Image (cartoon, rainbow, N blue to C red):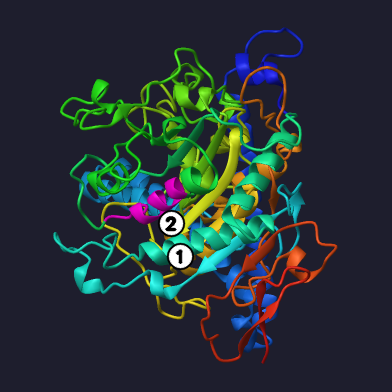
Amino acid sequence: MASRASSQCGPVCPKTGRPLSVSAPLARRTLVKRWAATLTGAAALVWFLIRVIPKPSRAAYPCQRAAFPIAAAFVMYLVGMSGAAVALRRARRYLGEARYVVASLCLVAMLACIVLTGDANPSIAGAEFIPPDPPNTPMGVARGIFPGRVTWAWDPDATYWSSIWNNSSTIFYWDDDHTSQTAVDVMVSKNLQWLTGETTDADAWDALFRYFNQQHGKGDVGYTAGEKVYVKPNHVQQRAHDWNNNRPDIVPQIELSMLKQLVSEAGVAEADITFGDASRYIADKVFNRCDPVFPDVHYGETTFYTYVSGAPLGGTEGRELLTSTPLPVVHYSNVDDWTEPPSAIPDGHIPQICVDADYIVNLGVMKGHSDAGVTLSGKNWYGCFGEPPGGGAGLGAAHHLIPDETPEPDHYRLMVDLMGHKDLGEKTVLYVLEGLWGFRNHGSSTRPSLWAQYPFNGDYPSSVLMSQDTVAIDSVGTDFLRQEFAADWMNGGVQRAVDDYLHEAALAYNAPSGTVYDPEGDATPCPSLGVHEHWTDSTSKTYTRNLSASGIGIELINYDLGLTPVPDETPTPGPDTGVAHWEIYR
């Protein structure tokens, strides 16, 4: 494992004590991984030929479907390299004969072969995402009143939309005509009760606070009047106050629902709640819905205007500024694995409210992401840096260290530092994922997506998920998203490491990358941050705790809102809970 000294000061020679090049460890790892990728490509080709030539029907087997793209990329790699070598030899010959035009064409052909070969490199070859860990092989230590529990509420009546409205300037999916506040309120309520095993929302919140306080050495006590709660929504697509469009964004209905829960059920005074995203604004669609009901809540937003010329002025029109801590708070644990020099990576300044708050509610969105594959509760923490994207005082010019930059597994993932930080992930009492509209991507051109998988069957996912375990809920979210959007990961070249941050977080105490995750920089490494595994399949959606009472992984709970199950599918009571687990009968 990388030492903390090397991650802070750079590696040194063990004999002379002189500093080594920061890029040397990364270069060695890259060389090893390139050789490993080449050998993997060769092995995939041999395996495919041995199995499929005697019996062509085997090409449809899952293992062969996984092997074929890697084998094909390997063949393209060999052909491309051979073509480049031939073109280079001919260019040299024609240069010797003073045939400069033909020699130039050969050089162009050589460069084209190299570019195409790079695209076909087996290390990043497009292939169906196959997690490195087989289904139902949990890793890490589960958290929660019911360890590893993730609850999933689904109600198709929560959403009503047609793609003909996707680019409308007057009809929006987040309007009450298209997202039901009542249905969202019910799903939030049921999730809370099933997550805690309680029968009222007030008792559910009391159980959540008591569990949190017990885990943090405060004893068996619930919420105490005067304690501060910070709600961190994902507002990445809220770029101004008058932001009215159908871009992928969290719906205001779930934000209002969460405030109603905290004030009316958890007993938190409005003035003790801060709500907002330090990297973005609070759009009118949210503020004008929430502020009239809860005028004493602190609605905080970005300090972007101090960085970006021409950006709207934050902290106006009833909002407040979420100012950053004056001292660096987040220490990045492995600068050796950045794509930029360490001098470009300052420690992070997070909002002061994160330091001052007693509890945090992480309110994320379940959607795809072109650079990371998924954006869930873990990536929601990136919005805790009040800076322009890709630079400034927080994440630094090295961006995110997400799979589009390091598309292979077993890398340091900055996200884990945020998930394990004492004032971010370790201060979170509840994780929520709003998955009503199933966005394929996070980009501005993305619109609500119909999902093919069971039980949605061509409808919008219309779902809300909750957990006390950040790794577990992101694992479930990843499984949902990969079933719909794995082809995007293939085309984006990020698929080999989409769930790498979950492996690193679950095994943070002994991370596969060798990183010592110490986000406070105080020589206190992170423990396991939760439990990770992948479900059995996308129809049964079962995890180890669903399969057996002795399971040590995830338990996915789904409840029935009086809906008629899809033919051949019957909801049956789960063990000891009366909660519906979807099981297949064929």
Query: What span is in magenta?
Result: 247-260
Q: Residue 14: within the magenta?
A: no
Q: Which mark is residue 485?
A: 1
Q: Position of residue 497 (x, y in %)?
A: 57, 50
Q: Which mark is residue 295?
A: none
Which residue bears the numbered disc 2? 368
| Other-residue count near label 2 (Cα within 10 Å), few / some / many at <14 / 14–19 / ≥20 | many
Quick check: 307 left or right of 464? Answer: left
Answer whether labels 1 and 2 touch (C-beta < 8 Å).
Answer: yes
Note whether residue 345 is visible: yes
Q: How many marks?
A: 2
Q: Say which quadrant the C terminus sits in.
A: bottom right
Query: Is 142 located above or below residue 582 in the figure?
Result: above
* Of the pair 374 and 274, the residue shown nearer to us: 274
What's the residue type where badge 2 is placed?
A: Gly
Q: Position of residue 31 (x, y in %)?
A: 61, 39
Q: Position of residue 473 (x, y in %)?
A: 60, 54
| Other-residue count near label 1 (Cα within 10 Å), few / some / many at <14 / 14–19 / ≥20 | many
Query: Is 210 located above or below residue 185 in the figure?
Result: above
Give the mark, 1 or 2, whose residue is nearer the N terminus: 2
Query: Is 224 located above or below residue 106 in the figure?
Result: above
Q: Position of residue 158 (x, y in %)?
A: 39, 69
Quick check: 448 left or right of 362? Answer: left
Quick check: 195 left or right of 234? Answer: right
